[in-house]
Image (tube, rainbow, N blue to C red):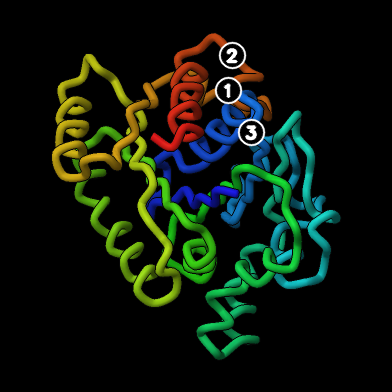
Amino acid sequence: MKTIAVTNLKGGVGKTTVSINLGAALSRIGKRVLLIDLDPQANLTEHLGTDFRKVPGVEQFIDGRSSFEDVVIHHSENLDYLPAGRDLAKLETALYNTHPTKAIRYFKIHNAFNKVELDYDFLIIDCPPSLGFLTINALSFVKEVYVPVQCHYLALRGLGKILALVEVIKKKYNPELTVGKLVPVMYDKRNKMSEFVISQLESHFNGQVSKAKIRTNIALAESPRYGKTIFDYQKGSHGAKDFSALAQEVSKGD
């Protein structure tokens, strides 16, 4: 099973959009996918049409109050997800108060998943936009980090922070952690800034930038309103085509 954390320390950069639609695209080519909403804002959960206030959330599985089977939701063929629940925001405080030993705090997710047998090809975690116990737990568990990078100048400057975090987690808690993909999002080939950002990424991170670029697409912004992935909302849109290309790239290990 390939384990991926989609993360960036800045909000509004497309983490949830990438997590959901990459997962959906992979499921459409026959890959079994588990999505995990680890953001207390519950955007992934609501995007998929679930009210986070009315379901047992991933936090109940992590802290042992509920089994995996009690929490997991089946979305469509090959695609399941663990929703964020109403108590997810309290989990970081609970980890600090209950587990004064750092090694336990930072491996809570890892330990929870070690107790279950999963039958998936991909596990994708949508991380919160902050450096806290939830993000560190996710990075201590997965093998790869995918970072959505807006095609804006300031996004380049902020990229160094998340890459530095990955190196710290790799050194302290997870020696197998790597940066899998830097995924350009909000790309517009007519915009000189988009091309500048791509050229900078490729010159500094050769081999880590995805070939697929997620273009600016109104359908991607609209689909959460209807509780649908881009493929259920507008399967012929640029967004659907771009995520299909990204899924092919990821599935082949390019």
Asked if labels 1 and 2 touch by Cβ distance under 8 angstroms, the answer is yes
Which residue in the protein does label 1 denote? 230
Asked if labels 2 and 3 touch by Cβ distance under 8 angstroms, the answer is no
Sequence order check: which comes first, mark 1 or mark 3? 3
For disc 2, the neighbor class at 10 Å (few under 14, some 14 to 19, many from 20) is some
What amino acid type is highlighted by mark number 2? Gln
Q: Residue at x 55, y 48 (%)?
A: 2
The image quadrant that residue 200 belongs to is top left
Q: Residue at x 49, y 52 (%)?
A: 5
**Is 163 situated above or below 193?**
below
Q: Which label was assigned to residue 31?
A: 3
Q: Residue at x 37, y 22 (%)?
A: 215
What amino acid type is highlighted by mark number 1? Ile
What amino acid type is highlighted by mark number 3? Lys
Asked if labels 3 and 1 touch by Cβ distance under 8 angstroms, the answer is no
**Is 10 situated above or below 24?**
below
Single out the residue that lies furthest toward the bottom: 100
Q: Give whichever of 178, 17 is nearer the camera.
A: 178
Q: Residue at x 30, y 42 (%)?
A: 208
Query: Would you say 25 lies left or right of 55 here?
Result: left
Q: Nearer the viewer, mark 1 or mark 3?
A: 3
Please tell me whether mark 1 sits on a helix, a strand or a loop.
Answer: helix
Which residue in the protein does label 2 denote? 234
Distance between the Cα atoms at labels 3 and 2?
21 Å
Residue 97 position in % (x across, y down): 61, 86
